[in-house]
Amino acid sequence: MSESHALAPAEQTLAERDTHLSEDAWALILEATPATTRRAYRDDWNRFTRWCATQERTPLPATAETLAQYATSLAMDGKAPATIGRAMAAIAKAHEAAGHPVDRRGAREVLRGYRKRYAKAGGKTKRAPALTLTALRAMVATLDPDTLVGVRDRAVIVLGFAMGARRSELAALDLTDLEPHAEGIQVTVRISKTDKDGAGRIVAVPYGSNLATCPVRAVEQWRTALAHHGRESGPLFLRIDRHGRLGHVATGKGSPDGRITGETVAAIIRRAAVAAGLDAASAFSGHSLRRGFATAAYAAPDADLVRIARHGGWKEGSAALFGYLEEVDRWRKNPAAGIGL
């Protein structure tokens, strides 16, 4: 699946025009899917089309048998069930955009059987470890407050944790999305994975009780550094190259405004975790902030599940959120603990 579509020329017949979309229409369709997901889907689609070429099968429209066979091929290659599921979603998205129906029933059955085999063989779904407050403090302590990188990374980590933010949400923030408040700052999240209509949400971030991990003070320090470098508008979090240059973008790489990416957020967290000597540090990622916030907020005495979900932008009844909270309830509300064993 390509971000650019070779469409028929404008001087087509009226009948032909009824079956084609303009470049503007394709662009809006593509923007309905988050950029990170779009890139992953594009890679999945390209792998599928290459496989179809070697197997002499038609990728678009693909038959149910082709999808089932491709899912089987990925399983035989030892791919994780989640990887296969995403590949099927990418193929379905390509068919939807092109106006073709797609039958994934056979592929779903293949995947269902493979999940059981994968589990029996000891395979586990990879999950980013939840970041605890103790780990957060240890990571922040490794950052040099006298360097641009240290100030930026502290702001990324503690703001991301306080918001329960996705890494893509952090990367997308602009300076104008932050509004001072007597109790802290209000952050407008304009684009979110689960906000399909772009309605946005406002996240209230209060002052912290610990100076080292206070998200409001960390962001204020970073904004002061940005202002010192003449940056008072545009992206909140910018790239910093190995020469210490702020917002510098190598030719042909990265966003031209110098904005960091979601991958940069993950790299910042992983680097700080390694520096702090945390167990399984290399497994930490951008999602560790989100999981860590959910479990820490739910473990608090006055936890409010509805408020936690709204704060972090989880859908009502989110299976992912309930999965995080189960980690807390597994011991706090263990049904075997009070039966007299």
Image (cartoon, grey):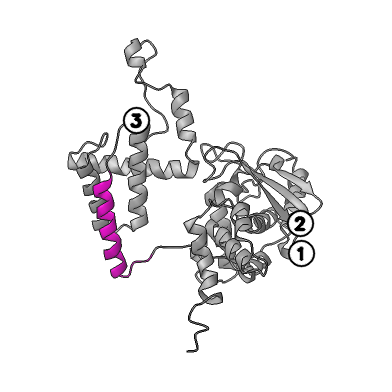
Q: Image check: 28 left or right of 120?
A: right
Q: Is the residue under label 1 in contact with that under label 2 (CB below 8 Å)?
A: yes
* In-front residue for pair 295/260: 295
Task: Note whether 332 is above or below 9 in the view shown.
Answer: below
Q: Give the range drawn in magenta.
A: 104-124
Measure how far apart labels 2 and 1 are at the Cα level: 8 Å
Q: Where is residue 338 in the image (x, y as percent from the top left)?
A: 53, 83
Label 1 sits on residue: 211
Tag 3, which secondary structure? helix
Q: Earlier in the sequence, mark 3 or mark 2?
A: 3
Residue farthest to the right?
Answer: 182
Residue farthest to the front?
Answer: 339
Numbered tag placed on residue 55 in the rendering: none
Numbered tag placed on residue 217 in the rendering: 2
* In-front residue for pair 289/140: 289
Say which residue appears at 58% left-offset and 65% top-offset: 295
Label 3 sits on residue: 98
Q: Image check: 40 left or right of 102?
A: right
Q: Is the residue under label 1 in contact with that under label 3 (CB below 8 Å)?
A: no
Q: Is residue 318 visible?
A: yes
**Circle 1 Cα neighbour tier, 10 Å, few/some/many (<14 / 14–19 / ≥20):** few
In this rendering, the label closer to the viewer, 3 or 2: 3
Magenta stretch holds residue 245: no
Under mark 2, the amino acid is Arg
Tag 1, which secondary structure? helix
Measure how far apart labels 3 and 1 are at the Cα level: 53 Å
Figure quadrant of the N terminus: top left
Q: Where is residue 48 in the image (x, y as percent from the top left)?
A: 29, 43
* In-front residue for pair 103/335: 335
To which quarter of the image does residue 249 belong?
Answer: top right
Q: Which of marks 2 and 1 is nearer the N terminus?
A: 1
Say which residue appears at 74% left-offset and 48% top-offset: 223
